[in-house]
Amino acid sequence: MSRVLILGSGGREHAISKSISNDKKVDKIFCAPGNPGTQEIGENVELDINNNIEILEFINSNNISLTIVGPEQPLENGVVDFIQSNGHKIFGPSRYSAKLETSKLFARDFMEKYNIPQPSYFKCSTEEEVVSVSTKLGFPIVLKADGLAAGKGVIICNNSLELDSAMDVMFNKKKFGKAAKFISVEECLKGEEISIFLVSDGKSYKILNSAQDHKRIFNDDKGPNTGGMGAYCPSPLLNDDLLEEIERTIIEPTINGMVNEGSPYTGFLYIGLMLTNGKPYVIEFNARMGDPETQVVLPMMNNSLYDLINSSFDSSFHEHEILNKEGYCVTVVLSALGYPDKYETHMLIKGLDKIDPNMYFHAGTIIDNNKNYYSNGGRVLNILGFGSTLAKAIKNAYSNIDKIEFKDMYYRTDIGQKGLNYIKELNDQ
C-alpha cells in the first residue's frame, strides 16, 4: 500500500487528492498544506512547500511512497531534483524542464530552437525597448512578465494608452516584482483557445484531455486576468486532424527537444494553444496541471491517476490507455468580490450540504471547530456540473451554484458559452 504526499492547497490539489483516493492501492494521502476538502480525504500537514529540506524530512519520517507537485513555485525551487537526488519518487519536471513555465523567454527561445509554432516575440527590459517593439508589431500586443506571476502577469494592449498603463504597472509600480525584470513582448494572435493536458515519462506521453479556461474576471472575457474563473472539458474544437497536427508540430518536438536539452520532461504538461486560421500556436506552457482545468479534466478520467503516475517511473507507462467519460464537465469558480485585486475573507459559506460532495472542490476556504466553512482567498470554491451535452453540463453547474451563498460572492455567468458557440458554428458548417 502506498502513502502519497500532495504539495499544494487549492482546488487543483483537492481534485488530485480526490482522484488519487479512488485507488485501492493508496493507503494514506497527506496534503501540504491542503484545505478543508483535502482534510476530508486524507491528512493536512503544515509544511513549507518551498522548503525542500522540510519536505524531505517529512517524506523520510512518514514513509511516503510518492510525492505529487501541484503548484509551480516548488518546481522553480528545484523540489523534484532535490527529492529525487535523495532517493524518493516525486512526480513533476526538473527545475530546468519547468523553465518552460517559470521563464516565458526560455520557453519562447526553446520553441524557436525546435521550430514549434508560436507568435513573434521580443525580449525587453526597458520602456523604450517595449515602445520600439510595439511600432514593429502594431496593436494589439501582449506583454508577459518573464517569471512567475500567479497566472496574472499577462497584459493585452490594444492601443498606446493601454501600453503606457501596462508599462507603468510592470516597470514603475513593479506589480509583478522580479518576475517582470524582463518582458516578453509578443504578437497578439487572434483565434480560438484550446488547452491540451498530458503526462510524460520523459520519453513518451499520454494525452489526458482538452479543456478551455476563462482567464478574465468579467463576462465576455473583459477585465484583468485572474488565475482562472472557470473551465469546461473537453473542447469541441479538437478533432482527429487537429490533434494529429498538435502532436506532430508541438507535443513531439517539445518532448524530444527536452531530451535533446539533456533534461527529459517528466510530469504533467499543460499546453495553451491559439487556433489562428485553423493552425495551432503555443501561447504558453505550464509545467503542471492548470487550475481550474484540473477540476474538469480529472473528474472526466476513467483511469487510475495513481497507476498512470506510478507507471511513469518504470517501463509500463506505454501500456496505459487514457479512457474518459462521455459528455462534458464544467466548473465555475466562486470568488470573493474584488478578486484579483482587493477582497475580503472570512465570509461564512452556506449551502455546501445541499449539493453532492463530488460536485465541488475547495479552493480558498477554512473550517472552524464547529465545521463551518469560511472564505480564505480570492477564488473560494469550484462548483461542477456534468452532462451528456455541454449545455446540460453548464445548466447543472449553475443549478448547483444556486444552492451556495456567502457575502459578496462573485462568479462569471458565461462559463462554457464560447464552447456552445463553437458547437453551433460547427453544426452550421
Image (cartoon, rainbow, N blue to C red):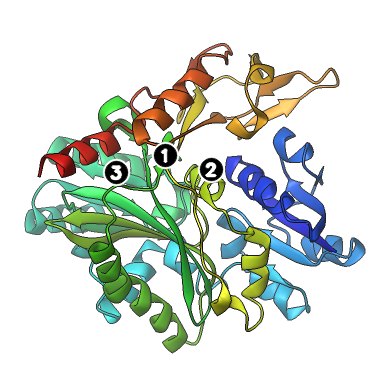
Could you say where residue 424 lies in the image, as x and y percent from the top left? 19, 36
Q: Residue at coordinates 29% horizontally, 38% vertically from top-left?
A: 419
Instruction: Kindly indicate whether the residue at mark 3 contacts the one at mark 2 (C-beta within 8 angstroms).
Output: no
Q: Quadrant of residue 421?
A: top left
Q: Residue furthest right?
A: 61
Could you say where residue 375 lies in the image, as x and y percent from the top left? 63, 23
Which residue is under mark 2? 295
- Residue 6 in the figure: left or right of residue 225: right
Quick one: SS at disc 2? helix
**Is disc 1 surrounded by few (<14), some (14 to 19) or many (20+) residues within 10 Å?**
many
Q: Which mark is residue 231?
A: 1
The numbered mark, 1 or 3, whose residue comes first in the sequence reads: 3
Instruction: Kindly indicate whether the residue at mark 1 contacts the one at mark 2 (C-beta within 8 angstroms).
Output: yes
Residue type for callout 2: Gln
Which residue is under mark 3? 155
Q: Is residue 164 visible?
A: no
Q: Quadrant of residue 63?
A: bottom right
Q: Closer to the camera: disc 1 or disc 3?
A: 1
Could you say where residue 178 lies in the image, as x and y percent from the top left? 46, 54
Residue type for callout 1: Ala
**Is disc 3 surrounded by few (<14), some (14 to 19) or many (20+) residues within 10 Å?**
many
- Residue 207 in the figure: left or right of residue 28: left
